[in-house]
Amino acid sequence: MRLAEIFGANVRRVRLKRGITLESLATEAGLAYSYMGGIERGQRNPSLDVAERISKALECDPVTLFRSTPADK
């Protein structure tokens, strides 16, 4: 699995666990809805700045989003 796919899957997992909609996450992170969807599907390669904004919006450690075996927090 590519890092972009791992990142996207982890973003989706954390988002759903927190009960946040894709649209709300995109808005909170200052991203377009379609771009956020592409990230979750592993079709986009977000910059480190974007990864940091997403982790802040999800209130999680950015490292969590890059782990191939996610630690549930």
Image (spheres, helix red, strand yellow):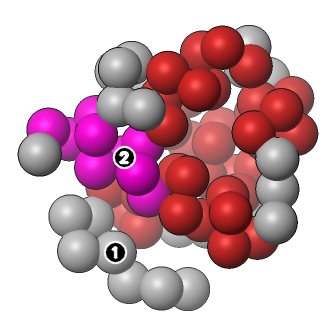
Q: Secondary structure at mark 1?
A: loop
Residue labelled with disc 2: 7
Residue labelled with disc 1: 70
Q: Amino acid at mark 1?
A: Pro
Query: Residue 47 magenta-drawn?
Result: no
Residue 50, disc = none
Query: For residue 65, what is the image quadrant?
Result: bottom left
What segment is highlighted magenta in the picture?
A: 2-10
**Looking at the image, is 18 positioned above or below residue 32?**
below
On the picture, is 64 further left or further right than 12?
left
Residue 5: tell me if it is visible: yes
Instruction: Determine the CA span between mark 2 and mark 1.
Output: 10 Å
The image shows residue 8 at horizontal and vertical percentages of 42, 42
Q: Residue at x 74, y 19 (%)?
A: 33
The image shows residue 52 at horizontal and vertical percentages of 56, 42
Identity of the residue furthest to the left in this view: 1
On the picture, is 18 further left or further right than 3?
right
Disc 1 residue crowd, few under 14, some 14–19, many 20+, Cα 10 Å: some
